[in-house]
Structure formats: structure tokens, C-alpha cells
Image: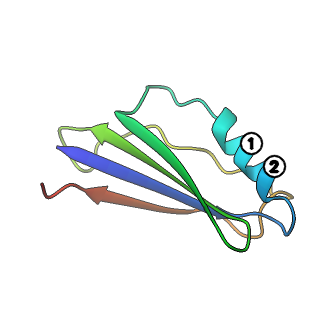
């Protein structure tokens, strides 16, 4: 089964490049099958990682919370199971 973890944060205005640099520097305990980073208006950043997991509830490595002075709110996280 493939599980996708989505991590989305909104940088403090004008600090989107710094948040992007921070996110790209984050190493996970294990390498995912795939990892992609996206940006959007208003200094938003989205990181999606894909994992091979036996169980949708399996514990998987996730990006941590950035420093509070870099983001405007706590990170939003979602977990999706592939339906093929």
C-alpha cells in the first residue's frame, strides 16, 4: 500500500525562500519512495512524501515543525492512502 504524507506551512511574509531552504534541508529517518516540494502564493510551502506501508496507520517519518518565527501558524498535515 502507498501512503502519501502532506505537510503544508505558511511562511512569515517575505520569508518563503527561507522556509523552502529549511524544508529542503530536513532529512527524514528513512528515504521515502518519492518526495516533492511545491510553493504557492502567500509564501505557502507544500511537501508530499510517498511511502510503502503495510498499514495506513503505520508510523512514518514526517517533517518537523519549523521555528515559530518562520511560520505564521502551526503546520497542517494530512495522510492519504492510495486507492490505485
Coloring basis for residues: rainbow
Mark 2 closeness class: few <14, some 14–19, many ≥20 residues within 10 Å: some
Give the x, y percent position of residue 15. 84, 59
x 57%, y 44%: residue: 63
- Residue found at the very far left of the displayed protein: 84
Along the line of sight, which residue is nearer the eye, 39 or 81?
Answer: 39
The residue pinned by badge 2 equals 18
x 23%, y 38%: residue: 53
Element carrying mark 1: helix
From the viewer's perspective, tell me whether residue 24 is left or right of residue 35.
right
The residue pinned by badge 1 equals 21
Marks 1 and 2 sit apart, C-alpha to C-alpha, by 5 Å
From the viewer's perspective, tell me whether residue 60 is left or right of residue 56.
right
Quarter of the view holding residue 49: top left
x 81%, y 49%: residue: 18
Q: Quadrant of the C terminus?
A: bottom left
Give the x, y percent position of residue 33. 34, 33
x 68%, y 33%: residue: 25
Q: Is residue 67 above or below residue 60?
A: below
Element carrying mark 2: helix
CB atoms of marks 1 and 2 within 8 Å: yes
Per the rendering, the mark at residue 80 is: none
Give the x, y percent position of residue 32. 39, 33
Amino acid at each position: 500500500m502507498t501512503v502519501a504524507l502532506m505537510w503544508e506551512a505558511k511562511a512569515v511574509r517575505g520569508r518563503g525562500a527561507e522556509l523552502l531552504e529549511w524544508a529542503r534541508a530536513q532529512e527524514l529517518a528513512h528515504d521515502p519512495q518519492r518526495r516533492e516540494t511545491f510553493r504557492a502564493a502567500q509564501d505557502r510551502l507544500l511537501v508530499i512524501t510517498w511511502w510503502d506501508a503495510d498499514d495506513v496507520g503505520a508510523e512514518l517519518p514526517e517533517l518537523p515543525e519549523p521555528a515559530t518565527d518562520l511560520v505564521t501558524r502551526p503546520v497542517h498535515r494530512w495522510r492519504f492512502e492510495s486507492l490505485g
